[in-house]
Structure formats: structure tokens, C-alpha cells
Amino acid sequence: MTNTYANIKSNTELSIPKHWLQIKTIDMHTGGEPLRIILDGFPELKGNSVLEYRKYCKENFDYLRTALMFEPRGHADMYGCILTPPNDEQADFGILFLHNEGYSTMCGHAIIAISTLAVQMHWISVNEGENILKIDAPCGRITSFTTVKDGKVIGVRFHCVPSFVIDLDQRVDVEGLGSVCYDVAYGGAFYAYVDLQKNNFDFNLSNKNYRTLIQNGMAIKHAVIEANNQIKHPFEDELSFLYGTIFIDKSNHPDIDSRNVCVFAEGEVDRCPTGSGVSGRMAIHKARKEIDFGQTMTIESITNSVFKASIVSEENFGPYTAIVPQVEGTAYITGAHTFVIDPLDPIKNGFILR
């Protein structure tokens, strides 16, 4: 063995200068969609609610969002979260969601992942069977149920915030696509839903069409934003924006009800079926009498990962008749990291190339 190689084997700990910022994370995925959970080293966020923490982070530490989500530490489709105190003592904790464009209002895959991690890290007293968490997201309080069997997490389901339909069967002219038929619904975030069965597109929802889906998804999103001024949350102005486009088509698998590909934020493609998007879909299907209480839909993503969705209850929510959807999925840990930020690094705050 050479001296150099012997030194390599005996010296594997990095000596980090004290003046470098260190941020510790645990990385997970839900149905292939990444989640970087920021646990330590992020500066303290000030405020008295999740929405206030979100605003403070955006105004003071947005460079750390880009440092952790963008290259070279992340990539254009990276997703992350920060845990905060809850809005009140009735919840367990709060959560902020980070991505390439900024800060989203709801994220189902993150709820599934963080609920899984809360059990695996024993942040709560873990019981066989269901373990309940109440999580304050920017869109409101989410209740999750993590199922443990023989000491292991076997799945998570969550009840989303009240979800409702804004528009059905609207049309908008989109350059390169012509007249596009779409619905708008809210499931913690607003989406334009575009069913390929109602539109004459020359592409399908295969991963081979990844770039085409991004281009057309963003074109539809911007066209709908320009044409539709009804995308408003009944209680929170900060939630009143169109987050993305969700394409819907038939599945090639006989035991799956449909396929779902979400293009959100600044052209990110969700690897999972999109928990908030599926929640909005449940409101659409209920409005069309395509699903009822006690029934379940299975929806797959561009990676063929699957969420199960159903309807828990119905209630009035401002001017809307809303449903409370349930979404089920599984998540897995992929790594634990200590990211460092060298103040002399000229690209320490990150960059994106597509």
C-alpha cells in the first residue's frame, strides 16, 4: 500500500473552518421526487406563524434556498423543506417548502416524507399501527397518519386542506398548441388541469417527452395566468397564484386509474403523482360525480410511482363546496449531508443549467 493511499484510508474526516456555514440535512424521496430536509445550521426564522416564517425566509435568507436547491449542491428539479414551530400548540410542527422558483404553499410528497422521518427519527412516541401528526403548512393544517408494522413504516396517508374547483372546461389559446381545454382546482395550491383526452396534442405523458412537457406545461400556465383572473384563495392572498400545470391521461397499466404529470414552479417536473395536485383532482372528480365517498383512485406519475386518493368529507369553504381529500404514498431516506458554504466560493449561492 502506498503512503498516499494509506493516508487516504486513515484520514477521511473533513476539517471545516469555523467561519464556514454548515447546514445539515437528511435527503429522502417520495415516488422518486426528492426532498432535502434542512435540520440544522439554517439561521433562525422570526415570526409567529408559518406564513410569517415563510415571508422572513424569503426576505432574508433566499440565497440559502438557492445554495441548497440549485447546482452544485442540488439541481433544477430539487425540492426541500425547513421545519419550524407550529402556529399553535394544537400542531406538532410547521413546515416550509423550497424549490427552484421560491416557496410553495403545499407539498404532499414532503408531508409523506417528513411523516416517515418523524417516526424513523423517534421525534414522536412511536406506536404499532397509526401514528398521527398535525403539521402546519403555509396552506393550513395537514393531518398525517403513518402506519408502523413490526417497528417499520409501511406507508403514510394524509388529509389535505379543503380542496375545491374554480373552473371546469375552460379554454385558452396557447402558442404552438392552439385552443387548450383546462380545469382549475385547489388542493393546497392552484393548478391548471389539462386532460389529454380532451385535447388534440401530438405528445403523451412518457418520460421521453420530458422537455416537451416542461415547455408546454409552462406555456399553458402563463396563458392561464394571463387569461383567468379568478384564481384567488377565499381567505389568504399569499395563496392566490397558479402554481403549475397538471397533464392527465390514461394509464397503460390496467390496475391504475390514470397518469398524472405535474409541471410546476419554474419548469420543475414532479417525479411523484403530486399530493396537492391529486388533492385538487379529487375535488374535480367529485364535482363531475366520477368519485364518491368510500371510493379510491390510483394515480401514477412519470416514474410510474403511485398515490392512492380518496375523499374523507365535504364542507363549505368560503364560497366553495370543498372536499377534504386523503392521499397515500411511501417515502425513503437516500442520504444525510453536511453542506458547507465557503465564503470565498464565487458561486456559493448556486446556479441552474437545464
Image: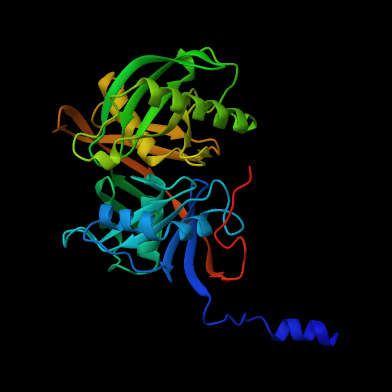
Q: Position of residue 209 (x, y in %)?
A: 62, 29
Query: Residue at the spot x=52%, y=50% of the render?
Result: 78
Is residue 291 visible from the viewing direction of this image? no
19 versus 181 height, above or below: below
Residue 350 sits in which quadrant?
bottom right
Q: Position of residue 174 (x, y in %)?
A: 49, 17
Query: Residue at the spot x=43%, y=56% of the render?
Result: 62
Across the whole image, how many numbered discs are drawn on residues? 0
The quadrant of the rendering that contains the C terminus is: top right
176 versus 31 height, above or below: above
Left or right position of 25 against 205? left
Query: Residue at the spot x=52%, y=59% of the render?
Result: 67
Q: Position of residue 33 (x, y in %)?
A: 50, 47
Residue 185 sits in which quadrant?
top left
**In this view of the protein, which residue sits in the foreground, 263 or 222?**
222
Left or right position of 272 against 2? left
The quadrant of the rendering that contains the N terminus is: bottom right
Q: Position of residue 161 (x, y in %)?
A: 25, 41
